[in-house]
Amino acid sequence: MQYQLLALDLDGTVVGRDLEVTAATLEAVTAFQASGGHVTIATGRTFRTTAPFVEQLHIDAPVICYQGAMIRDPRNGTTLFHEPVPAELAAEATRLLLDAGIYVQAYIDDELIVPYEGDETKLYRSFSPVHLPVTVVADLPAFLLEQAPTKLLFIADEHEVGPRIAGLQLHFTDRLNIARSHAFFGELTAPGCTKGRALAWLAERLGIPREAVAAAGDQGNDIAMVAWAGLGMAVRSGPAELHAVADVLIDGPEQAGLAAGIRRYLIP
């Protein structure tokens, strides 16, 4: 199979904790592009914080941000697709989390809207080379009733994130999409909003069939994307649920696993 489109999760797949794109990864992505393939990023990050990686990887295809809630063209910044969290659901989820003592932040127009700036905000910022503008609001749920956010993200101890997600999923059922994106992060997007759905949308726009699409990811928020792709690659350190839908396993960025996977499965 000649793969025509490759979708890449960033954190834990393309880059490790140092946020560096290795030479091996850049060379493999460049070689795939030189063979005629298109490359997109599919991340939970905002467009603003995705842009440095778009530049490093020389990506010109539309990129998937906010867990699939937004697709933008990096060449001109045009938003091709955007589905925010319904305002009432955003306010309800935010109130539930804050009442439980869980820090939660919202994203509007590539900016952070937070209930306060604390250690959680600092932790979040440490995962990005670009710091988003921050607005602190005293009553975040009330604020979100007036302005629907693109997504919500909560931060908790890594052992609490899983149970908290399970509780939110039980509460909201199919009214929101809720997934883990990091050891400390849980993310909430509009119902049905996943990287998998966004990748299907993009592939159709580019005229590329599903079987000619490859995708790589490392967390629960990548499950839909890896499952949908014709070739799904999962990082070995990821959860069992991700491994279950993947076609192949690859090593993490510290071991240049993505580069090896691209060269083995995608480059003729």
Image (cartoon, rainbow, N blue to C red):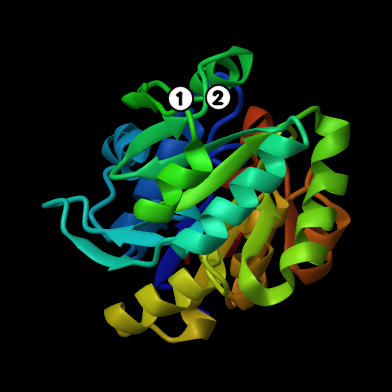
Distance from disc 2 to disc 1, alpha carbons, whole Å, reads 8 Å
Residue 80: where, in percent of width, then height? Answer: 24, 67
- At x 63%, y 72%, the residue is 175
Q: Nearer the viewer, residue 148 or 246?
A: 148
Q: Is residue 55 left or right of residue 196?
A: left
Task: Sort mark 2 into few (<14), some (14-19) or many (20+) by Cα contacts within 10 Å.
Answer: some
* Residue 203 sits in quarter: bottom left
Say which residue appears at 30% left-offset and 56% top-offset.
Answer: 34
Task: Kindly state the secondary structure of the residue where label 1 is placed.
Answer: loop
Residue 124's tag is 2
Residue type, mark 1 in image: Ser
In the rendered view, would you say 35 is above or below 76?
below
- Is disc 2 in contact with disc 1, using a CB cutoff of under 8 Å? yes
Q: Is residue 75 above or below residue 136?
A: below
Quadrant hosting residue 231: bottom right
The residue lying furthest to the left in this view is 76
State the residue in front, 11 or 20: 11
Q: Would residue 130 appear left or right of 240 to someone viewing this image?
A: left
Q: Position of residue 102 (x, y in %)?
A: 71, 32
Residue 186 in which image quadrant: top right
Residue at 31%, 25% in the rendered image: 133
Q: Is residue 217 above or below residue 184?
A: below
Q: Name the residue that disc number 1 marks.
A: 128
Apparent side of residue 247 relative to residue 89 in the rendered image (left or right): right
Name the element at disc 2: helix
